[in-house]
């Protein structure tokens, strides 16, 4: 079962330019950190996919193992783990997230 969850996570990360694992969904975030990351991503106007880790405990545990990162939200851009809320916020403030997203969508 654990391998199956990790495989599903891997497929989603690979098949979406921006994949956000969060608590809740973009219309109804269930934590402030998830809400902040959604707000940042929406400011760029690029489409992004989300998965609510609260809906499935296996995914909630699996995403932490997949990334070796202990917290949610987690964002992946172009198949690569970027980080959580603090890292996304810092990249956004420095202008680096804009460049990262633009590069992902130009491929």
Image: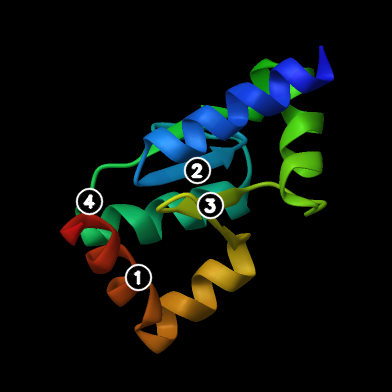
Residue at numbered disc 3: 75
Give how far across and how far down residue 92 sits, in percent.
41, 76
- First in sequence: mark 3 vs mark 1: 3
Q: Which mark is residue 46?
A: 4
Q: Earlier in the sequence, mark 1 or mark 2?
A: 2
Which callout, 1 or 4, points at the residue further toward the start of the chain? 4
Dot in front, 1 or 2:
1
- Marks 3,1: beta carbons within 8 A: no
Measuring from the top left, give residue 72's x and y in whole percent: 69, 46
Q: For the view shown, which residue lies furthest in the bottom direction?
A: 94
Q: Is 41 placed left or right of 76 in the picture? A: left
Q: Secondary structure at mark 2?
A: strand
Mark 3 → mark 1, Cα distance in angstroms: 12 Å
| 89 horizontally vs 68: left or right | left
Q: Which quadrant of the view contains residue 96?
A: bottom left
Q: Which mark is residue 20?
A: 2
**Residue displayed at 33% across by 41% down:** 48
Question: Mark 2 touching mark 3, by CB under 8 A?
Answer: yes
Asked if the residue under mark 4 is in contact with the one under mark 1, i.e. CB atoms within 8 Å, the reply is no
Where's residue 90, x and y in %? 53, 80
Residue that label 1 marks = 100
Q: CA distance from mark 2 to mark 4?
A: 13 Å
Q: Residues within 10 Å of mark 3 (few under 14, many from 20)?
A: many
Q: In front here: 106 or 63?
A: 106
- Tag 4: Cα neighbours inside 10 Å, few (<14), some, or many (≥20)? few
Kindly state the secondary structure of the residue where label 1 is placed: helix
Secondary-structure class at tag 3? strand
Q: Say left or right for 45 vs 23.
A: left
């Amino acid at each position: 079962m654990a391998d199956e969850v990790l495989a599903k996570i891997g497929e989603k990360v690979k098949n979406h330019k921006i994949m956000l694992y969060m608590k809740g969904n973009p219309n109804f975030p269930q934590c402030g950190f998830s809400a902040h990351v959604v707000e940042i991503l929406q400011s760029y106007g690029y489409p992004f996919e989300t998965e609510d880790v609260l809906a499935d405990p296996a995914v909630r545990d699996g995403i932490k193992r997949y990334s070796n990162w202990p917290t949610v939200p987690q964002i992946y851009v172009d198949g690569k783990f970027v980080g959580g809320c603090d890292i996304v916020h810092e990249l956004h403030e420095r202008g680096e997230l804009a460049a990262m997203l633009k590069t992902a969508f130009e491929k």
